[in-house]
Image: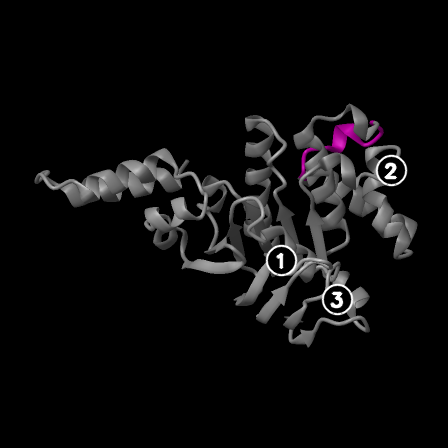
Amino acid sequence: MFIEFKDVSFKYYGNEQNILNQLSFSVEKGSMLAILGHNGSGKSTIAKLIMGLLEPTSGEIFIEGEKLNEKIVDTLRQKMGIIFQNPDNQFVGVTVKDDIAFGLENHQIPRDEMIRKIDEFAKLVDMQDFLNENPENLSGGQKQRVAIAGALAMDTDLIIFDESTSMLDPKGTKEINQMIQTLRKNYQKTIITITHNLEEALNADRVIVLNDGQIVLDGTPKEVLKEEAILEASGLKLIDGISLINMIQNYTIRIKNKEEIIQALWELTFKM
């Protein structure tokens, strides 16, 4: 397992109520996990705990079998990259090239290797023509692609997408979701996507749904998306295709080839 949470609870200083309550789950190396939940459900807190930006109030977190603590957090953090919700909050360079190079320079990567990595990953995210651009001139989707290039250049094993499409238009959202699939197929990265959008969970290997700091659903996308009542109680809006499937399944009048219709709708949903 790449990541293991064992009975992890967390509350912010000054708060009486836990944000997370005895959370236990694991993430296999090379897999994609989608964590779903409404705002305030605790899903972004999980990302901060994994990155070592917060410490659990109780419980333990393991990264590749090593317990996450102050002594080794910096070493373990080198295995991880995170793409934040607001793309403007993660830029430190004057140009796109400077921004991709930032982490490499901090790790004293030789110049020739640095240039090679910048070129390689800028091309991968289709930003090779923008290397000398000021990040302020880029669209939201382009900014997120640059952030992905920076994480890849650092050769991280895990990339966390923390609500990374929530501030993007439909075009930018599609670009980032396509990039996530490219990372899965070609780079065998472990990916965690944190979102409230059910559509972004369709291609995950596994889906966890949080509500009030607890896991209320855990399974494959198909297994989780069938649980209409729990999803709605967790503040999540169903995909139109899933709602139609549920309507057909619950329809009491006999429909010829009903199962074939349902199967076709599932297939179409996962091709969206």
First along the sequence among labels 2 and 3: 3
Span of residues in magenta: 125-133
Instruction: Decide if residue 2 is in sight here.
Output: no
Q: Is residue 160 left or right of residue 205?
A: right
Q: Is residue 238 left or right of residue 244?
A: right
> Label for residue 141?
none
Does dot 2 land on a helix, a strand or a loop?
loop
Q: Please state which of the two labelled residues, at mark 2 or mark 1, is closer to the viewer.
A: 1
| Secondary structure mostly taken by the magenta-highlighted segment of the chain | loop
> Label for residue 46?
1
Residue type for callout 2: Gly
In the rendered image, residue 157, in percent from the top left (x then y), is placed at 67, 59
Residue type for callout 1: Ile
In the rendered image, residue 164, in percent from the top left (x then y), is placed at 63, 41
Does dot 3 land on a helix, a strand or a loop?
helix
Quadrant hosting residue 191 = bottom right
Residue lying at 85% horizontally and 45% vertically, measured from the top left: 101
Q: Which class describes the residues within 10 Å of circle 1: few (<14), some (14-19), or many (20+)?
A: many
Residue lying at 77% horizontally and 39% vertically, measured from the top left: 89
Q: Please state which of the two labelled residues, at mark 1 or mark 3, is closer to the viewer.
A: 1
Residue receiving disc 2: 93
In the foreground, 183 or 42: 42
Locate the N terminus by quadrant: bottom right
Residue lying at 48% horizontally and 60% vertically, measured from the top left: 215
Residue receiving disc 3: 76
Residue 131 belongs to the span the image colors magenta: yes
Residue type for callout 3: Leu
Locate the C terminus by quadrant: top left
Does dot 1 land on a helix, a strand or a loop?
helix
The answer to whether residue 87 is above or below residue 107 is above
In the foreground, 89 or 14: 14
